Amino acid sequence: MNRREALEHFHKTYAEDMLHEKLYQVAVLYEHRKEELIFSFIQSFQSICLQAISAEADKTTIGYITYSMRRTYLREHIYNYVIEVYGANWYFDPLPYRGTYDAGWAFGLLAELEDELSQLRKPYMNKVIQPDVERYVLQAAWEFHHYILKLAKDAMQQAVQLPEFKALKCEDDLEIRVGEYKGISKVVYCTAYGVLHDSTG
C-alpha cells in the first residue's frame, strides 16, 4: 500500500477506535471524580481572582477572564490551561494577569493515546511516521477540551459565589470564557446574564 492508503488504514484500524476509548475513559473519570475536579477548578479561579485583587490599582475594571488551551504546550506535553484576566479591551490589554489550571487529569489520556499510536505505527514501515501521529493527536485535543469546558460550566455556579470574585471591580458585561488561546472560546459566565447553560458538552 502507498502512504495515503497506509494512513487511511492506520486511522480506521487503530486511531479512531483508540480515540473513542480514551474519550470514554475521560468521561468515566470525570463522573467518578467530579466533586474533586470541581474543587480544583474553583481553587484555580480563586487564585487568579486573588492575583487580580492584589494588583487591581494598576488596572481598570475587569472585562474578561479566560481559560485557554495552548497547542504549543500540548506539543511539549504540558497540560496547563493559561488563565488570564483582561480589562474591557481583552486581547488588546497589554498586561493581563496570568495563572494556570492543570488539566492533566484529562490530557494525560491524550498523552497515552499518542504513546500507544506511536507504537502501532511502526509496522507500517515508515509509511506512517511520528509527525502523522502528532498531527492526529493535536487534532484530537479539541475532543478532550470539551471535558474542561464541561467542568468549567459545572463549577461556575460555585466559583462566582467566591468572595474573591465578588470583590473584583468588573464590567457590567464581564465574560468568563473557556477555549483555545486567542481562538474559539465559549462563554461560561456573563455578569449580564449569570451562569450560562446549554445542551452542548
Image: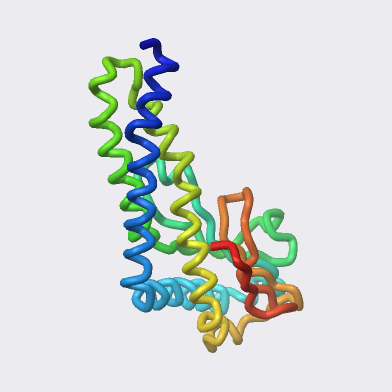
Residue, far top: 2
Query: Closest to the observer: 2 or 177?
Result: 2
Q: Give the residue displayed 67% in from the left and 69% down from the top.
A: 175
Among the 4 quarters of the image, the one containing residue 156: bottom right
Where residue 28 sits: x, y (%)? 34, 64
Among the 4 quarters of the image, the one containing residue 36: bottom left
Q: Relative to 134, does residue 82 appear above or below in the rendering? A: below
Query: Closest to the observer: 139 or 4?
Result: 4
Where residue 85 sits: x, y (%)? 60, 66
Q: Is residue 113 left or right of residue 61?
A: left
Look at the image and name its color scheme.
rainbow
Q: Relative to 56, does residue 140 appear above or below in the rendering? A: above
Where residue 122 sits: x, y (%)? 24, 23
Where residue 57 sits: x, y (%)? 64, 76
Q: Give the residue displayed 35% in from the left and 41% down from the top.
A: 17
Q: Is residue 150 left or right of residue 171?
A: left
Q: Quadrant of the N terminus?
A: top left
Q: Relative to 156, does residue 98 appear above or below in the rendering? A: above
Q: Quadrant of the C terminus?
A: bottom right
Q: How many marks?
A: 0
Among the 4 quarters of the image, the one containing residue 166: bottom right
Q: Give the residue displayed 33% in from the left and 26% down from the top.
A: 130
Q: Relative to 167, does residue 55 appear above or below in the rendering? A: above
